[in-house]
């Protein structure tokens, strides 16, 4: 019988044990951070303009933060709508469902690129999906054909977004309105009610207020006699002598004597003498700081009341001419009051606007308020409705505040031998506030484009347009859809041919070699423009190549 010796490869055993150990450790680490991402579409074939639903399903730990892709990351397809996340929970695991509505307006076969999902500090990618966009069949025998309509120039309109400011305007106006309403309403009502009273009743009301003021108890004899004297003088001013308020005591008494002699006032001498004594006492209290005793002061108050009663009875009934004159006087007074209200109302309105404007300047800043009220061309661009379009062939998808206009360019015979197409789309100019250019070149034969050499021509291209002092920096660039190219950026200087003023500009340029062609996106903007940089970055971030995988 033959004995066989079993040989054990110790090195192989060690490797397997090490693999098992590492797998066990990884399994232990992964217990609390399990995550899974998948994506599906409801249909792989749709007609032009139809909607397809792209669904992402994520299973993750409840303690992890999940970030789904947003924006035009589905290029070459366009996102119509991004729906809210549907969340369900199973123990310590979350099941998240995120849907997007996608479409495309060009027929062909497309690939939805992989989508990036952030779960905690880890990055996951979905699988890319192929879809087909079919043409809509049209029966030309039944459907009439029409000529393409010519371009129509549309005047630009000033766009001012009041929705952003209405809340800030409403708050100070509301607060000021509430304060004015509660503070002034009571006072106005009371004053209006007193103004409508006849002079006789208003004079008695003044005496009543003097009694309620308790000025004598407060030892305010000067104020007491001042109000008592004014009550008598004002009543006489309105009913007998219209200069009673500014006349001295002797002048007033002399005038009343004249009125009695002329028959316009049927008042006895005793009443006039009593009125004279009270007014003299009031003058002494106001100017000589005399302090009559309380009994005398109360007696003087009663004298004034009797003078008012007797004066009312002593005034003859007004004639028709006097009534008409009085009515005319009342109209003049009403007109003066109305003008005062208009003046004070205008001043109040200006004050409210000034306060509101000051609040805006403090909160938003002077430049923002000035640009909002007076207008700013670049700010209007930023706040306008942006347009996403595809330009050239191979197509470049880009979002801009204005539609780019095709630049007529005639190729030479030599270029036609090499190039299948050369298209340029432009908005603005180099000496303006903002300048955007999209250029695409398509070759007749398969050509390997050297982007490094293409970038070297940047300075020459700008110099051909009159630019000077050009600085050039470049770096690798990749779009959200995965198209790789070179980003060139820097600054330059141009001179306005009309004003001869020099303008310092910044520029950004993206260069791609996709689909056997060459694509270039250039943005030039005024370096001093505070809104231009944000617009340029938004445009650059929207650039996508439709054939990018």
Image (cartoon, rainbow, N blue to C red):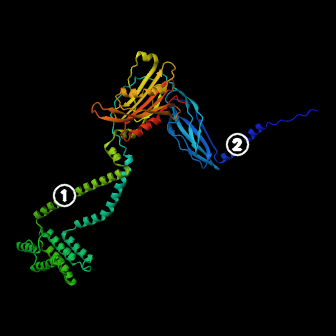
**Residue 125 drawn above or below residue 320:** above
Q: In which quadrant of the rendered image does the C terminus lie?
A: top right
Q: Specify few, some or many for label 1: CA neighbours under 10 Å numbering under 14, 14-19, or 20 or more.
A: few
Q: Give percent across and percent down for residue 131.
A: 57, 30
Q: Name the residue under label 1.
A: 335
**Residue 330 drawn above or below residue 157:** below
Name, please, the residue furthest toward the left.
261
Q: In which quarter of the image is residue 52?
A: top right
Q: Name the residue under label 2.
A: 22
Q: Give percent across and percent down for residue 84.
A: 53, 44
Name the foreground residue: 399 vs 252. Answer: 399
Q: Which residue is drawn at 53% across and 33% down?
A: 482
Q: Is residue 480 visible from the viewing direction of this image?
A: yes
Q: In which quadrant of the rendered image does the N terminus lie?
A: top right
Separation of marks 2 and 1 at Cα, in angstroms: 98 Å
**Residue 255 drawn above or below residue 103:** below
Query: Mark 2 against mark 1, which lies toward the viewer?
Result: 2
Q: Give percent across and percent down for residue 149.
A: 38, 25
Residue 533: mark: none
Q: Specify few, some or many for label 2: CA neighbours under 10 Å numbering under 14, 14-19, or 20 or more.
A: few
Q: In which quarter of the image is residue 118?
A: top right
Q: Give percent across and percent down for residue 242.
A: 12, 67
Name the foreground residue: 201 vs 450. Answer: 450
Q: What element carries label 2?
A: helix
Q: Is residue 306 visible from the viewing direction of this image?
A: no
Q: Which residue is drawn at 58% across and 33% down?
A: 128
Q: What element carries label 1?
A: helix
**Circles 2 and 1 in contact, beta carbons < 8 Å:** no
User: Relative to 12, is 397 on the left or the right?
Assistant: left
């Amino acid at each position: 019988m033959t004995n066989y010796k079993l040989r054990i490869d110790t090195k192989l055993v060690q490797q397997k044990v090490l693999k098992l150990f590492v797998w066990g450790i990884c399994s232990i680490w992964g217990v609390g951070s399990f995550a899974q991402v998948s994506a599906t579409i409801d249909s792989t074939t749709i007609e032009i303009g139809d909607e397809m639903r792209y669904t992402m399903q994520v299973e993750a730990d409840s303690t992890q933060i999940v970030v789904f892709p947003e924006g035009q990351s589905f290029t070459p397809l366009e996102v119509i709508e991004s729906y809210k996340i549907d969340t369900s929970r199973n123990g310590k695991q979350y099941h998240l469902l995120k849907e997007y509505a996608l479409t495309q307006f060009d027929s062909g076969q497309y690939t939805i690129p992989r989508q990036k999902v952030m779960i905690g500090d880890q990055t996951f990618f979905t699988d890319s999906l192929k879809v087909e966009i079919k043409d809509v069949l049209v029966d030309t025998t039944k459907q009439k054909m029409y000529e393409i309509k010519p371009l129509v120039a549309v005047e630009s309109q000033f766009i001012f977004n009041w929705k952003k400011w209405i809340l800030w305007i409403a708050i100070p106006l509301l607060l000021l309105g509430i304060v004015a309403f509660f503070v002034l309403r009571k006072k106005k009502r009371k004053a209006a009610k007193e103004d409508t009273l006849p002079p006789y009743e208003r004079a008695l009301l003044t005496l009543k207020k003097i009694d309620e003021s308790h000025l004598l108890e407060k030892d305010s004899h000067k104020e007491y006699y001042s109000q008592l004297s004014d009550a008598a003088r004002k009543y006489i001013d309105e009913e007998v002598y219209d200069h009673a308020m500014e006349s001295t005591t002797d002048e007033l008494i002399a005038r009343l004597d004249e009125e009695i002699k002329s028959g316009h006032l049927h008042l006895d001498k005793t009443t006039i003498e009593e009125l004279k004594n009270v007014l003299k006492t009031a003058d002494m209290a106001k100017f000589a700081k005399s302090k009559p005793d309380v009994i005398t002061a109360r007696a003087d108050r009663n004298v004034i009341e009797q003078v008012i009663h007797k004066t009312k009875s002593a005034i003859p009934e007004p004639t028709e001419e006097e009534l008409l004159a009085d009515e005319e006087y009342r109209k003049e007074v009403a007109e003066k009051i109305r003008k005062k209200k208009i003046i004070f109302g205008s001043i109040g309105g200006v004050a409210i606007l000034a306060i509101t404007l000051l609040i805006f300047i403090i909160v938003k800043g002077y430049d923002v308020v000035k640009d909002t009220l007076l207008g700013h061309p670049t700010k209007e661009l930023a706040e306008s409705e942006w347009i996403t379009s595809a330009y050239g062939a191979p197509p470049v998808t880009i979002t801009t505040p204005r539609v780019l206009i095709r630049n007529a360019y005639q190729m030479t015979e030599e270029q036609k031998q090499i190039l299948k197409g050369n298209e340029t789309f432009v908005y603005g100019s180099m000496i303006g506030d903002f300048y955007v250019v999209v250029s695409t070149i398509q070759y007749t034969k398969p050509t390997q484009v050297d982007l490094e050499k293409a970038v070297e021509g940047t300075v020459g291209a700008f110099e051909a347009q009159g630019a000077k002092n050009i600085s050039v920096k470049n770096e690798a660039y990749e779009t959200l859809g995965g198209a790789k190219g070179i980003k060139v950026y820097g600054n330059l200087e141009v001179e306005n041919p009309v004003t001869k003023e020099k303008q310092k500009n910044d520029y950004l340029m993206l260069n791609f070699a996709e689909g056997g062609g060459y694509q270039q996106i250039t943005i030039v903007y005024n370096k001093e423009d505070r809104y231009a940089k944000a617009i340029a970055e938004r445009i650059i971030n929207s650039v996508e190549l439709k054939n990018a995988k």
